[in-house]
Amino acid sequence: MITRFCSKKYFFLFCLFIFPFITAQKKFTIVLDAGHGGNDHGAARKYDGLGYIAEKDITLSVVLKIGRMLERDKDFKVIYTRKTDVYPSLTERTNLANRSKADLFISVHVNASHKTAPYGTETFVQGPDQNKTNLEVAKAENDVIFLDAQDRATFASYDPTSPESLIALKLQQSKYLESSLVFGGMVEDNFVNKDKRFSRGVKQQNLHVLRMNAMPSVLIELGFVSNYDEAQYLASDKGQNESAESIYNAILSYKKARDKKSGSEIAAKETVKPKEQPLKNDFRILLMSTPIKYNYGDPIFKGLNYILPIKENNIYKYYYSVSNFASIRDANLKTARDAGFKNAYAVGFVPDQALSNGHYTLELYVGKDKLSSDSYILKSLKDTKREKVSGLFYYTYGNVKTLEEIVQIQKALEEKGIKNSVIQKVSK
Ligand SMILES: [Zn+2]
């Protein structure tokens, strides 16, 4: 198409100009995710002679090494979820990957066991938990979700331990499973053949960073920090260089296999199934509307997590999850209906849309009695507003135009210890 278009004399100069941009777009985009970071050290051990060894440092070092090798090749575009010792939430990591429409997502981690004997590498692809030995990894790598207020307040996920999450999972996993397995196999083969490591294999596991990605994705465990020999290897330049090279070489092999138009099943399958494009709107699942206020974790939510209540005209609307992917939206809707919310439906939200007629505020407290002037809320928040409506005192805080802004304020208040505030949409 490009050749024929460019052969027309009229467009020659135009094509000279535009062609580099067309080829630039065909770069193979890789998201490199160094596990953990910041206050989240991941797996860590202290040994005499080796000192303190933390997963977050090993993963960052290895990821930067892989990135440097890839960046030498202009066929690749590298996106890092972090390049320093910071902690992006798991949702921020997967959203970044989805927005960038990456071709491959690689999350690098280090394992730990409560015993010192286990050792070896393993690579996880998205799938249902296969056996009990995988559960420890799922717990270690998913636990971060529950520490993460932003994930809960802003974005969607399911409780990975709940049975209904498996329903949604089945929709997601099949799409990129084959490519993920192929790549995972290449990584483990390199660890064994090149680095003479012991491979525990390629396994399926229900992990947040893999589940929420709309592209082939793997989570690589480089070895066990709880095993002295492996800890020493992983902390060394040799160990980190070898691990990075093995992953880099697997990326080259995977891209080569994918690029082959004939003879490669992966390439054929991926051209038949185009990548899912994000929708313009965010979708939340409306579970119910009621004048009653329920707090997080109330049994009325039937175990569903990630509930966002929004009050409007004295009615609390309880929304579950959020996604801008149709497949995830539909899966979340099914999860809600299967949990018993038969009338649940998806509601579209325009991201960053400012209210033209009204504002968002946070309802902090409702009660028959006034808050005492030395209550924690009034002492820590100066600009609280009080209103009395039919015998009840309402305390609110904040006045902003977008849902995203009020969610940020709510998050800041939660960090101060002011919980269970409700976002309120006030129309004028
Ligand atoms: Zn980890």
Image (tube, rainbow, N blue to C red):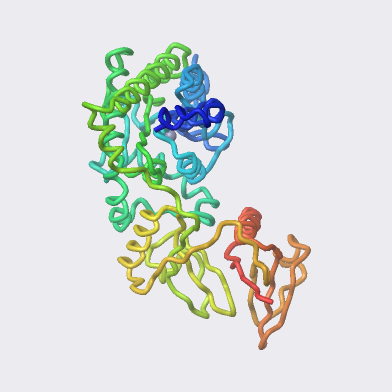
Is 54 situated left or right of 329 in this image?
right
Query: Does residue 227 lie above or below 331 as drawn?
Result: above
The image quadrant where one finds the N terminus is top left
Query: Does residue 222 lie above or below 158 as drawn?
Result: above
- Residue 293 x, y percent position in the rendering: 53, 75
- Residue 420 x, y percent position in the rendering: 57, 65
The image quadrant where one finds the C terminus is bottom right
Q: Which quadrant of the structure image shows residue 262?
A: top left
- Residue 196 x, y percent position in the rendering: 29, 13
| Residue 64 visible within the image | yes
Q: Which of 179/35 is in front?
A: 179
Q: Which of 286/409 is in front?
A: 286
Q: Which of 285/111 is in front?
A: 285
Query: Does residue 343 lie above or below 184 as drawn?
Result: below
- Residue 206 x, y percent position in the rendering: 33, 44
| Residue 44 visible within the image | no
Q: Which quadrant of the structure image shows residue 112?
A: top left
Is 194 situated left or right of 146 in this image?
left
Q: Residue at x 28, y 28 (%)?
A: 261
Q: Which of 221/156 is in front?
A: 156
Q: Residue at x 49, y 23 (%)?
A: 67
Extreme bottom residue here? 390
Q: Which quadrant of the structure image shows residue 245?
A: top left
Query: Does residue 298 lie above or below 175 as drawn?
Result: below
